[in-house]
Amino acid sequence: MGSEFEAPRIVVEPPGPRAREIVERDSRVLMQSFVRWYPLVIKRGFGALVEDVDGNVYIDFNSGIAVLNVGHRHPKVVEAIRSQLDRFLHYSLTDFYYELAVEAAETLVSITPISEGKVFFTNSGAESIEGSIKVARGYFGGSRQYVITFIGGFHGRTYGAMSASASKAIHRKGFSPLVPGFLHVPYPDPYRCPFPGIEGEECGEAVIGFIEDVVFNRVVDPGEVAAFIIEPILGEGGYVVPPEGFLPKLKKLAEKHGILFIADEVQTGFARTGKMFAVEHWGVVPDVMAVAKAIAGGLPLGAIVGRSDVMSLPPGSHANTFGGNPVALSAFKAVVEVIREEKLAERAWRLGERALKRLRELEAESSLVGNVRGKGLMIGVELVRDKHSKEPAPREVGEVITRCFKRGLLVIGAGLSTVRIAPPLTIEEDLLDKGLNILEEAIREVEKEVKG
């Protein structure tokens, strides 16, 4: 795959007959507790391209939900996996030792903003968040039970992660009682500030003031708060970039009260935003970071990285069976090498600026595009029914996404009514432009129909 195919290439209107057959079989044997965006049935992928079971070839603006930062089946990642297959596949890192895990942990610490850090390997982003919560509460010996998270944030669907999340009500509906001790405060969305009459940089100031003046004075004493958990840029919640000064001020507030700052970099990490980790855009050094998704090029792996003194849970209090799987760790080391050698952070920033410029031109012309935002190749295009009222346009987002799929572009939504753009950081410039062409055409068509 790759150069042998012109992309996009639609040979049969998707979903084709083979795809429809598999979707029907899927409905019979898999619990349908998740929602697919459209009936894509993937056969194989290479770079920034995906081929389905009917021979259609798509430009991938999803990256397997921000996982394939180095692209589908990067040759160096594949070779690292093959090499490890000849050694051993598993031997439970939390019960025994292997040097590969030490090397991987050393590598991971070296690329984070946290110096003198320690690592705990997990299997997923949700597990990294669950472990981070335990690390924070354990660090204070149980004396600080509360954790403050942000409305719009998504941290996973296991019980602790779900309790920390506040992105969509459906994620939590019917599952109470949830894990106690979580407080949710507004996320400072410059476009949709939760405080009336405030927008932009002032929204961040308002949120900090709300935490200090309302939460700490009326809800919980800051001496009982173990941690803030925050996505530096909202992911599932809408690809929202906070006001420029917000994260440094939140870190300063945390330090003032001895509260740990936990950065959920599950979706924003590994060069996605133009930096290895998104907090680096604001010069913030977290006490703990939760990572996963792009860490291993598509294999299940996650990690908690934290200050050595904070990563202090006693022996026997936290472990798992598969975290730090040697095949996944080999892939991780290759991913880091690719990011460094191909300068993917710099490339993500350059291509992101190119895409943002074009999309902001569309925003200025279109009555349907309310706001374009992002950093690097993590870009959100929010659609609205009215630019003045900012009424969300979820139906229109669904229509745009479906039209893109039919024409060979894979994109999905986020937040209230945002199209999220997160292609592999290795995407060729002509494919990026072709994908943006398709997206723009779909938006203009839907806009014209809405007006009509």
Image (cartoon, helix red, strand yellow):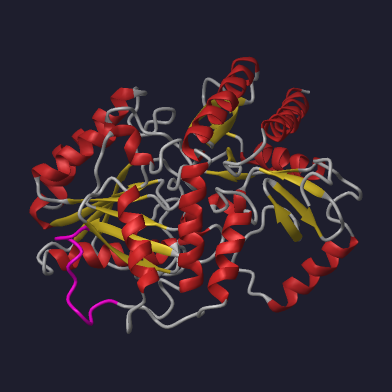
Q: Nearer the viewer, residue 54 or 414?
A: 54
Q: Main secondary structure of the magenta part?
A: loop
Q: Quadrant of residue 395?
A: top right
Whether residue 241 is visible to the viewer of this picture, yes or no, is yes
Q: Residue at x 19, y 65 (%)?
A: 137
What is the quadrant of residue 324 in the picture?
A: bottom left
Residue 126, position in %: x, y? 42, 63
Please state the extent of the stretch shown in magenta in the rendering: 307-318
| 95 in the magenta segment | no
Compared across the picture, whether 356 is left or right of 161 comes to right
Where is residue 346 drawn, in percent x and y? 48, 33
Task: Examine the rendered structure and indicate whether residue 112 appears above or below residue 434.
Answer: below
Residue 428's spot in the image, x, y percent? 67, 36
Can residue 159 be seen in this snapshot?
Answer: no
| Picture residue at 56% right of the left edge, 77% below the top | 86
Q: Nearer the viewer, residue 391 or 89?
A: 89
Q: Is residue 343 above or below residue 338?
A: above
- Front residue of this view, candidates 91 and 364: 91
* In this picture, residue 23 sits left or right of residue 223: right
> In the visual, does 46 lie left or right of 16?
left
**Looking at the rendering, in which quadrant would you find the C terminus?**
top right
